[in-house]
Amino acid sequence: DTGVSQDPRHKITKRGQNVTFRCDPISEHNRLYWYRQTLGQGPEFLTYFQNEAQLEKSRLLSDRFSAERPKGSFSTLEIQRTEQGDSAMYLCASSRGQGGREQYFGPGTRLTVT
Amino acid sequence: AQSVTQLGSHVSVSEGALVLLRCNYSSSVPPYLFWYVQYPNQGLQLLLKYTTGATLVKGINGFEAEFKKSETSFHLTKPSAHMSDAAEYFCAVSASGAQKLVFGQGTRLTINP
């Protein structure tokens, strides 16, 4: 069990650029989640996958955001035309089994939009 | 819908003193409740969880929490604080059939020597 990994750990980009983050879940976990955390706040749910199917998306996930999990393993989160308000920590988590199972979090990707 | 309120954005205690971090939740269905800890520039680590059964839940690092349905509370306690407990603590709730976690705003715990 190597834990959830995320890449990159830090990303600085200029407003208007596109960015993509990657998450590798714990290998036997079939559920993968994305959250966003701004300074001084708790994480907010963005979206989640069961295997390769995206089953729920938050209203926070505007049309500039897209997430994929093409083969039910790693996932990518892309933000197009970044805005300063997108600056945040993007957290990925994974779990297995039914609802209520604990989610294991990665170290996060900190995005700074200048 | 679920929501979480953590009372006190910042709690400060002396080393060796009791730690009490408060969490109240709202849920229209039986909740699953969690406490996570976050150290600076790191992800979240699960401390403990309540799903069903015993209402007093023991977690890692000497922490425990009690689910009180009548009070809609899930407060986190530790009998004796250690310097290494200084971190941000988050309470979270999910509906029993749902997948997403809904987090409180967090409580920053400071330990005074």
Image: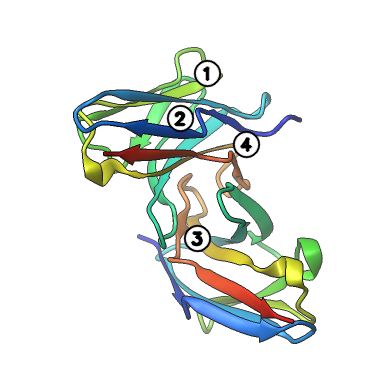
Classify the position of the N terminus of chain B by image quarter.
bottom left
- Residue topped by disc 1: A72
In the rendered image, the vertical position of residue B23 relative to residue B104, given as above or below: below
On the question of residue A28 being in view, the answer is yes
- Please say whether residue B56 is visible from this viewpoint: no
Give the x, y percent position of residue A35. 43, 43
In the rendered structure, the residue with mark 3 lies on which chain? B
Which residue is denoted by mark 4 in the rendering?
A: A97
| Mark toward the start of the polypeptide (2 vs 1) | 2
Position of residue B61 measured from the top left corner of the image (x, y, whole percent): 79, 64
Along the line of sight, which residue is nearer the eye, A62 or B24?
A62
Chain-order first, disc 1 or disc 4: 1
Above or below A80: residue B37: below
Disc 3 target residue = B93
Which quadrant of the figure has residue A111? Answer: top left
Q: Between residues A37 and A68, which one lies in front from this camera angle? A: A37
Question: In the picture, residue B75 is in which quadrant?
Answer: bottom right
Q: Residues within 10 Å of mark 2 (few under 14, many from 20)?
A: many
Mark 1, chain letter?
Answer: A
Local SS, label 1: loop
User: Which residue: 47% across, 35% down?
Assistant: A10
Are the residues flagged by discs 2 and 3 from a single subunit? no
Whether label 3 touches label 4, CB < 8 Å:
no
Q: Nearer the viewer, mark 3 or mark 4?
A: 3
The residue at the point 74 percent across, 66 percent down is B84
Residue A49 marker: 2
**For the point 55% across and 49% down, which residue is it?**
B41
